[in-house]
Amino acid sequence: MHSKFTDIQKADVIAQYAERGYPEGLVFHSDQGTQYTSAAFRALLSSYGVTQSFSYPGRPVDNAVAESFFANLKREELYRHDYRSEREFREAVTDYIENYNSVRPHRSNNYKSPNIKERDFKLLFQSTLSRAFASFCVTAMPR
């Protein structure tokens, strides 16, 4: 079977991984496209210790968030435009993702954007951790 995973895509994956500081425990969510299920792509992810996540054929709920994102991207952006160059395509996808993550409210996030939801989660986690630490310090102090 011919793989659609190209050297350009490989370089892009490596660059994106490096840009994030080579994080441990990274999960790569994707749809079932042949470029993502190819042996070459799976081997690349494995070589970096990245776990791949996608739904099984006919079971999109296994990875509903990623499946929903790609369906929206295709329906709202990709199928509506004819791109004149790879650069124009990349800019459009980057703009779409930025809007999707920073501006667009999501019902599943209580009508907050993913970035705001993540920020709120971090603040809550930090606050909870601070209270737990303070409580520990108070109970651990000699009387």
Image: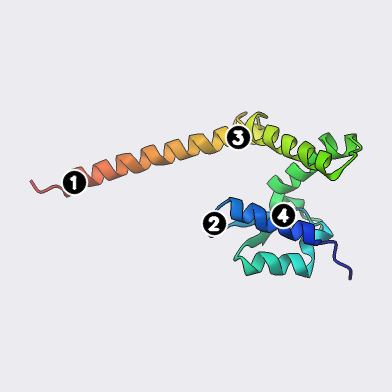
Q: Secondary structure at mark 2?
A: loop
* Residue that label 4 marks: 12
First in sequence: mark 1 or mark 4? 4
Q: Amino acid at mark 1?
A: Thr
Whether residue 12 sits left or right of residue 119 in the image: it is right
First in sequence: mark 3 or mark 1? 3
Whether residue 132 sits left or right of residue 84 in the image: it is left
Residue nearer the viewer, 36 or 16 = 16
First in sequence: mark 2 or mark 4? 4
Q: Amino acid at mark 2?
A: Pro
Q: Amino acid at mark 4?
A: Asp
* Residue that label 1 marks: 139
Quadrant location, the N terminus: bottom right
* Residue that label 2 marks: 23
Q: Secondary structure at mark 3?
A: helix
* Residue that label 3 marks: 109
Quick check: can you spot residue 54? Answer: no
Q: Mark on residue 15?
A: none
Tell me the CA gap for discs 2 and 3: 25 Å
First in sequence: mark 2 or mark 3? 2
Q: Residue at x 89, y 68 (%)?
A: 2
Q: Secondary structure at mark 4?
A: helix
Q: Amino acid at mark 3?
A: Asn
Q: Residue at x 69, y 56 (%)?
A: 13
Tell me the CA gap for discs 2 and 4: 16 Å
First in sequence: mark 3 or mark 4? 4
